[in-house]
Image (spheres, helix red, strand yellow):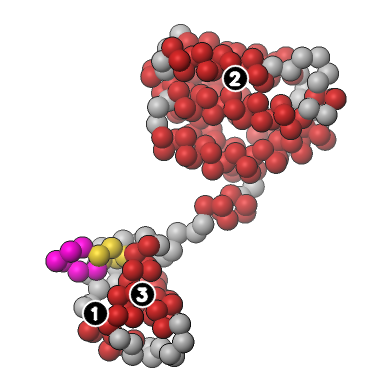
Amino acid sequence: MQIQRHALADQASAALLDRIRAGEWPLGHKLPGETTLAAQLGVGRSTVREAVRELAGKGVLQSRQGAGVFVTATDVPEDWDAVLRRAGIAAVIEARMAIEAEAAALAAVRRTPADLRALRRALRGRAVEGPSLERGAIAAHVDADMAFHRAVVVAAHNEVLVELFDGFVPRLRTAMVDMLRIRPLPSEEADHAAHVALVDAVAARDARAAADHSRTHLASLKEALA
C-alpha cells in the first residue's frame, strides 16, 4: 500500500493499524524492521518511527529496546467517555454493581476509623428531611448520594475502583436527576435505611453483608430506572 504524501505519519499509522486489524501481525507478534516497513509504505524511516510512536501511544504497539516493536492490541481501544455515552443506564448500573459490591466488601475489611467517620458524614449529608426533594433539591440530593457511594469505594483503598467509579458518575448523575424529577422515590425513608444498613455492615467489618446491601440497593435502582 503506497502512501500519499500528505500527513504521512498519520497515513502510515492508519495503514499499519489496518494491517494489524486484518491479522497480518497477531497479538504479541513482532513487526518487521523500520527499513522493511518504510519500503512497503513508501515513506521514510523517520515517518515509520513517528507512526509507531502514535500507535504505541494508543496502546496498539510497544517498542522494546533491543528487541523491536510488538503488537499489544489488535485495535485502538474506544474512548471511555464514548462508551458511557452510548451505554444504556441499565448497563451502567450493572457495571456499578460489579464495582461497588466488591468495593463494599473490601471497605468492610480495610476501612479505617477515618473512613468510617467519612462514611457517616456522607450518610448524614444524603439524608432527606421532609419534602425536600419536592422543593427542587433533587440535584443536590443526587450529588450527596454520589458522594456517599464514592466514600464507600474510597474506603476500599483501591485506586482502580475509585477511578472506575468516577468514570460512571457523570453518566449516572444525569439519569438520576431526570428520574427523580419525573418519578420520586417510592419511599425516601426506605432508601436511606438501605444506606444506613450498608454503613452498619462496613462498621461491623461484615464483608458479605456489605456486598449484599450494596448489590440489593443498586438492583432496586436499576429496576426503578428501567
Q: Quick check: 67 left or right of 18?
A: left
Amino acid at the residue labelled 3: Ala
Compared across the picture, whether 225 is left or right of 10 comes to right
Horizontal side, residue 183 vs residue 34: left or right = right
Quadrant that contains the N terminus: bottom left
Residue at left offset 47%, top offset 35%: 162
Residue found 78% across the figure and 27% down from its top: 137
The disc labelled 1 sits on which kind of residue?
Glu
Q: Check disc 3 and report the residue beneath it.
A: 51
In the figure, residue 23 lies in which quadrant? Answer: bottom left
**In the figure, residue 52 lies in which quadrant?**
bottom left
| Quadrant (top left/top right/bottom left/bottom right) for the C terminus | top right
- Pointer 1: what residue? 34
Q: Is residue 210 or residue 168 the one in the foreground?
A: 168
Query: Looking at numbered disc 2 in the image, what kind of residue is underneath it?
Result: Ala
Span colored in magenta? 64-69
Work out whether 82 lies above or below 46: above
Q: Is residue 140 left or right of residue 134?
A: left
Element under label 3?
helix
Residue found at x 34% / y 74%: 50
- Asked if marks 3 and 2 touch (Cβ < 8 Å), the reply is no
3 part of magenta stretch: no
Return the residue at label 2: 122
| Local crowd size for mark 1, using a 10 Å CA cut-off: few (<14), some (14–19), many (≥20) | some
Query: Local crowd at mark 2 within 10 Å, few (<14), some, or many (≥20)?
Result: many
Query: Residue 67 appears at what percent x and percent y?
Result: 16, 66
